[in-house]
Image (cartoon, rainbow, N blue to C red):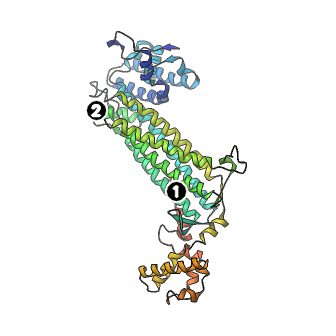
Amino acid sequence: MTQTKNLWGGRFTEGADQTFAEFNNSFGFDRRLFGADIRASIAHCDGLFHAGVLTRLEAERIKNGLTTLLKRADFDKNYFDEISAEDVHSFIESRLIQLVGDTGRKLHTGRSRNDQVATAFRLWLREEITDTSKLARQLQTSLLDLAEKNRGAVLPGYTHLQRAQPVLWAHWCLAYFEMLVRDRERLDEVWRRVNVLPLGSAALAGTSYEIDREAVARDLGFDGVTANSLDAVSDRDFAIEFTGACSILMMHLSRLAEDLIIYATNEFGFVELGDAISTGSSLMPQKKNPDAMELIRGKSARVFGHHAALLTMMKGLPLAYNKDMQEDKEAVFDTVDTVSLTLRVTEIVLRNITINAEKSRLAAAKGYLNATELADYLVQKGEPFRIAHDTVGRVVLFAISKGRELNELGLEEMREFSEKIEIDVFDALSLEKTLASKNQIGGTSPERVFEALDAAKRDLEIEAN
């Protein structure tokens, strides 16, 4: 392996300590910016040509050389291991000079590694955000498929992990669908702020060459250029925002995983895990462990840590660029990898679970989940809600003492608590009526849920087209 010459060696008379050099180098991880940096360098080359810094021949030689580097990296799996470099940017420059000679040394005119790094990073992240959003969309589709497959299934809804009111399984699916809607909106917002070109800011003060920054931005598909060179090279808000948006997304996936972990226990038994997403115990032959969901839950903490690390790294940095900011790459790279894999695994989980509709429906019909319906029934009969609430509380206490559900009590037994209760109360307390009564927008009535399910499908179809 040959060693490349540092891009900044003219000021120095001695070489860097080897341990420090290893500590300082980032090529081991920032090489994944290779393609993005090549693209940005080609656009910068065009900018130098139009500014009169490069002749047409020089510009063509440089661009052809950069394109050749890209092709060779795709072809040769060991391409990055043949030269030891400080970072991917010095690697590219060194390779380019090898290929096209001294003409390659002109490419860095009018730019610094500060704005070069920021540009490549934004280019790379822009594509990753798009890919992450696509994976989230695929997960939304899986949720809709699960809802459609279990349209008639009922689930006890919980507050404080205590049975509260019955909901449709499809309503549960749509709850997580809505979370992913917001997640993707946040990713879109981050994408827009990522999609601003810092190139042309140079080290911190801007460039003295007449490079048309807006033309370079158009070449690279950026919406515009940064307005302040000091801010441009020292800004990592976009990385913090991205990891923040991913942290919220991972929190949602963790909640989904936690629900399924609980529902898959013998105590609940609402969900059966497929073999594809489960593991066994090395000691206990009967076990079927929800490892996929537990890892989803656990990996959320990893992404939260990256978000906290970036905030902590940036909080005390003076303007403009500081070497601390090299630490942004690994945090963002690992966030991308972790979130992408977690989204894929969550989709696999949803396609490998079976809903025990009979057991979940039975659970939704027991535990006095229709108590609120009895209170609403009394309100409709003219009782103030607070009085109705107190009355139903006493009815529930009586039913518990008898070991019966509310709809298993006799009419005369219930009338001892309120003379407003009549024979129609049993219809009001049925599971079907309990669900159907939640018929306002966003409610769990079959009518509303199936409307929402159809609307969600249409939204995804419109987006796809």
Mark 2 to mark 1 CA distance (whole Å):
41 Å
Q: Is residue 397 above or below residue 335?
A: below
Image x and y of residue 231, in percent: 29, 35
Q: Is residue 10 among the parts visible in the rendering?
A: yes
Reply above or below: 110 against 1: below
Residue 176 shows which numbered tag? 1
**Quadrant assignment, res 71:** top right
Camera-nearest residue between 414 and 328:
414
Q: Which mark is residue 211?
A: none
| Residue type, mark 2 in image | Pro
The amino acid pointed to by label 1 is Tyr
* Outermost front residue: 401
Residue at point 57% right, 45% down? Answer: 295
358 horizontally vs 158: left or right? right
Residue 102, position as x, y percentages in the image: 41, 12
Q: Determine whether the residue tagged by mark 1 lies in a helix, strand or loop.
A: helix
464 displayed left or right of 363: left
Q: Of residues 444 and 284, which is closer to you in this image?
A: 284
Residue 107 sits in quarter: top left
Position in image of residue 249 (x %, y %)? 48, 49
- Relative to the observer, which residue lies in front, 379 or 117? 379
Furthest-right residue in view?
285
Task: Look at the numbered disc 2 and give the secondary structure of its residue.
Answer: loop
Query: Callout 2 environment at 10 Å: few (<14), some (14 to 19), or many (20+)?
Result: few
Instruction: Give me the residue at 45% from left, 49% from top.
Output: 248
Q: Earlier in the sequence, mark 2 or mark 1?
A: 1
214 horizontally vs 133: left or right: left
Q: Which mark is residue 318?
A: 2
Asked if residue 194 shows in the view, the reply is no
In the rendered image, residue 384, in percent from the top left (x then y), is placed at 41, 82
Q: Nearer the viewer, mark 2 or mark 1?
A: 2
The residue shown at (50%, 73%) is: 439
